[in-house]
Image (tube, rainbow, N blue to C red):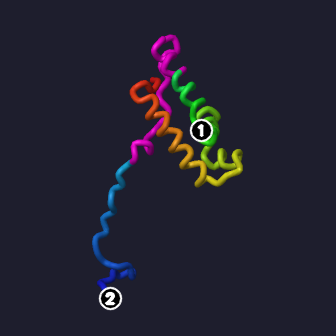
Amino acid sequence: MGRRRDDGRPAGNTTRRRRTLCPLRAWRRPRVAPAHEPANLAAWAELHRQVEALPEEEREVFDLLWYQELTQAEAAGVLGVSGSTVKPRWVAARLRLLQALGEGWPD
């Protein structure tokens, strides 16, 4: 048997590994720029067009989480699915939008 600490846990390297953060983990709603800027209006219009083009399940989740500002648990209740079903749909929707919009994401 290996070495043990006084509290009974195995001795050894106690440093925790840092997690590599997925770019989506830090994904947040962009700040709102003045609405009168034509480029900004066009970017927001394109975002809404791309949201409408999402597959139905992803679009429903995106609508509830982004537009309606529900939590994932609340969205799961509305949709009648588990939270573990909502999360991959949310990630997939964001990935599709990021790929479709690229640098055209609205400010």
Image check: 63 left or right of 3? right
Q: Is residue 64 magenta?
A: no
Residue under label 2 = 1
Image spot of residue 32 (x, y percent) = 50, 23
Give the SS element for disc 1: loop
Residue drawn at 61 percent across, 37 percent down? 59
Residue 70 appears in view: no
Q: Position of residue 68 (x, y in %)?
A: 64, 34
Q: Residue 31, image x and y in percent?
A: 47, 27
**Rendered-image quadrant of the C terminus:** top left
Sequence-wise, the earlier of marks 2 and 1 is: 2
The residue range painted magenta reads 22-45
At numbered mark 2, what does the secondary structure look like: helix, strand or loop?
loop
User: Residue at (54%, 49%) from the top-left corner?
Assistant: 88
- Residue under circle 1? 55
- C-alpha span from label 2 to label 1: 54 Å
Q: What is the chief secondary structure element of the magenta stretch?
A: loop
Residue visible at 56% across and 45% down in the picture: 89
Residue 65 at x, y percent in the picture = 60, 39
Identify which residue is drawn at 53% across, 39% down. Answer: 93
Amino acid found under the numbered disc labelled 1: Pro
Of badges 2 and 1, nearer the viewer stands 1
Q: Specify few, some or many for label 1: CA neighbours under 10 Å numbering under 14, 14-19, or 20 or more.
A: few
Res 57 → quadrant: top right
The question of residue 29 being in magenta is answered with yes
Above/below status of 42 relative to 4: above
Query: Which residue type carries mark 2?
Result: Met
